[in-house]
Image (cartoon, helix red, strand yellow):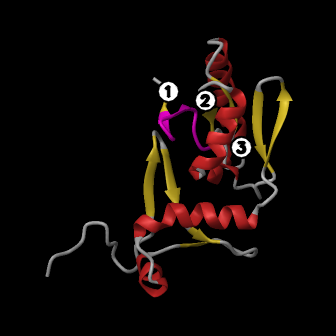
Amino acid sequence: MKVDPKSPPDNALIFDHFVGDLHLRYAFDDPQFTLFVRGHDLKRLGLDRDELPALVVSNYRRLYPKVAVLHPDPGLGVVAHGGQLEPCVLLDGAFWERQQKAAGKELIAIVPSSDEVIFTSREPKQNIELLKHLAVQRYEKAAKRAVSRTVFAWQFMRWQVLA
């Protein structure tokens, strides 16, 4: 019997690399506790692991239909009203294409904590330094909720680490 390398052991937690130092951890949404998705859950639900990111986007849009972008400063966007799961919006390519079209320029973003996504256009160049500074500052302030100090760029319909 050939073992599919994408098929996790029944009790193994399902998580995937996303971009840079970001990983996807899949969980069932429950108001009282967090239950992470395991291999046996995929079998029970008849899901393929490759379907999970699109399912996350669909569920996120359904659960948080009022996700919005606030502009605390001109040109700076902050994702809001995402149920303290704002980083999930990184998976929503249509959302980022709309934001990029509105900006008219390539976007860069940071995810310093588990409830923050901050973004702006890549130009002018001082925006890169601004996000680098905010990433470190907010990451350190986030303590246990800290996620990443990395700056990401939206290019070719996907996130990449800003080089």
Label 1 amino acid?
Leu
Magenta-drawn stretch contains 75: no
Magenta-drawn stretch contains 156: yes
The residue nearer to you, when weighing 114 against 145, is 114
Furthest toward the bottom, the residue is 44
Residue at figure coordinates x 60%, y 51% from the top left: 92
Please report whichever mark, 2 or 1, sits nearer to the chain's N-terminal start: 2
Q: CA distance from mark 3 to mark 1?
A: 18 Å
> Residue 98 appears at what percent x and percent y?
67, 41
Q: Verify CB contact (< 8 Å) between mark 2 and mark 1.
A: yes
Vertical position of residue 46 compared to residue 61: above or below: below
The residue nearer to you, when weighing 43 against 142, is 43
Furthest toward the top, the residue is 125
Q: Verify CB contact (< 8 Å) between mark 2 and mark 3.
A: no
Q: Which residue is mark 1?
A: 162
Locate residue 152: give its quadrant.
top right
Q: Which residue is mark 3?
A: 116
Label 3 amino acid?
Glu
Vertical position of residue 137 compared to residue 159: above or below: above
Which quarter of the rendered picture does the N terminus lie within? bottom left
Please report whichever mark, 2 or 3, sits nearer to the chain's N-terminal start: 2
Whether residue 81 is visible, yes or no, is yes
Label 2 amino acid?
Ile
Q: Which residue is mark 2?
A: 108
Q: Give the side of residue 132 with respect to residue 70, left or right.
A: left
